[in-house]
């Protein structure tokens, strides 16, 4: 884990914003991929 306590408050805030933005991007891409995979499976189950 990176110790950000030694950096100034603006750097800590920027790192936090960056981490939240990165997490949002990963979740957006992950859920998009899951939707692409799950939609055909759900459709097949509905019409089976």
Image: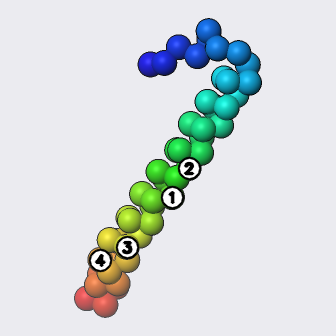
Nearer to us of marks 3 and 4 is 3
Q: Which mark is residue 24?
A: 2
Q: CA separation, marks 4 and 1? A: 20 Å
Query: Residue 1 or 45: which is nearer the viewer?
Result: 1
> Dot 4 corresponds to which residue?
41
Sequence-earlier tag: 4 or 2: 2
In the rendered image, the residue lying farthest to the bottom is: 47
- Badge 1 density bin: few <14, some 14–19, many ≥20, Cα 10 Å: few
- Badge 4 density bin: few <14, some 14–19, many ≥20, Cα 10 Å: few
Labelled pair 2, 3 in contact (Cβ < 8 Å):
no
Q: Decide: is 24 above or below 14.
A: below
Nearer to us of marks 2 and 3 is 2
Q: Decide: is 9 above or below 33.
A: above
> Dot 3 corresponds to which residue?
36
Residue under the image location 42 percent in, 57 percent down: 30
Q: Which mark is residue 47?
A: none
> Dot 1 corresponds to which residue?
28
């Amino acid at each position: 884990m990176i110790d950000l306590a030694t950096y100034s408050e603006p750097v800590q805030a920027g790192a936090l914003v960056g981490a939240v933005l990165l997490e949002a991007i990963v979740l957006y891409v992950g859920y998009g991929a899951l939707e692409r995979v799950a939609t055909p499976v759900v459709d097949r189950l509905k019409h089976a």
